[in-house]
Image (tube, rainbow, N blue to C red):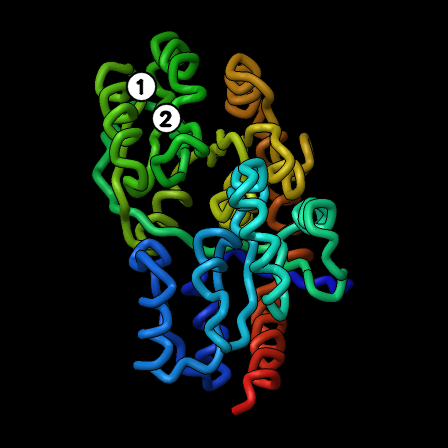
Amino acid sequence: MEEGCGVPGTLPCTWDHLEAAGHICILKDAFDFESPSEIANLIAAENVEAALALHLYRGGRLLQGHGIPFGVIFGGTDLNEDVNQGEKNKVMGKVLEEARFAVAFTKSMEEMAQRQWELQQSRTPPLTGMPSFSAQVREINQSADNLHVFLLICGLRQVKDPLYVVDVFSEWHQEEPNVYLVIVGPEVDPVFTREVKAKVRRTAGVRLIGEMPQGDLHAVMKSCFVVVNSSVSEGMSAAILEAMDLEVPVLARNIPGNAAVVEHGVTGLLFSEPQEFVQLAKRLVRDPALEKEIVANGREYVRTHHSWQAERDTYQRLVRMLEGSSGH
């Protein structure tokens, strides 16, 4: 088993690594394709020699049977959600049989895949690190004295559960008007997005911001007090790693994907239910020494375990594997 590491990046960041090595890359969204025949047309038109898919089911299944070598990167919902659906599980197993390699962001993801499909260890080099995300900024009123903004970054879909702590946070805001919860992210699920918007409109102390450029998002992160993750499941949260890298405290839901990178009380804080979230949030507000310690430990963790250069080297080597088996 080979240990790899990476700083937060998205598939576009992976492309940056590969283009830096001289490869020509074409980035496509799996949702843009309705059938494998459309992928076949793309492969022929662009003379594609190899492919890399993010998400074993959504992306990987489209690459089967086209005669080009490909690798897959586990996304999170493929291992945490889709694996529990019989037909999807079967399809993903077939994808892995054809894939030249599979990338897992954490050891726990790797072990989960091993249990499900009995993969050979040499085919799943773990990479810690996940894509950077984007979003659009709207001004927040920062006139309150001693303002504390808790930033929850996610695409608006149910698995991210952005409403999990909304009610308890609003109660806290009514006691202490200088605390705000700001939810930032793209509208992924239109039906769920309407639910989130309706809830936020009638909830004091909670704001919703749409998608914004990465640079703007990082500026917002640097100015916030804490980055929050309330997901039901995660592969590896980009927001958590980027927060650590930007020296912002992390307050995350205690799920396997988050617990793989956040050590409670050391590199961040983990909560298991909404009331505990508020208790820990108040503790951070009132204990600057704890905040400072968590920030320092988080930054050191990212520097030690999530090296941008190591991620680049690993992806470049994996693509060379695909080149070697493409027959070109």
Q: For the residue labelled by badge 2, is the local secondary structure a helix, a strand or a loop?
A: strand
Residue 166 falls in image quadrant: top left
Above-or-below relation of 214 to 166: below
Read off the residue under disc 2: 181
Q: How many marks?
A: 2
Q: Residues within 10 Å of mark 2 (few under 14, many from 20)?
A: many
Q: Residues within 10 Å of mark 1 (few under 14, many from 20)?
A: many
Above-or-below relation of 170 to 31: above
Residue drawn at x 72%, y 50% is 114
Horizontal and vertical percent position of residue 328: 52, 91
Residue drawn at x 34%, y 56% is 215
Whether the residues at callouts 1 and 2 have beta carbons within 8 Å, the answer is yes
Residue drawn at x 49%, y 32% is 231
Residue 160 falls in image quadrant: top left
Above-or-below relation of 169 to 28: above
How far apart marks 1 and 2 lie (CA) works out to: 6 Å
- Residue type of the residue flagged with mark 2: Leu
Name the image quarter holding the N terminus: bottom right
Q: Nearer the viewer, residue 160 or 120?
A: 120
Which numbered dot is residue 205? 1
Q: Report whether 47 appears left or right of 64.
A: left
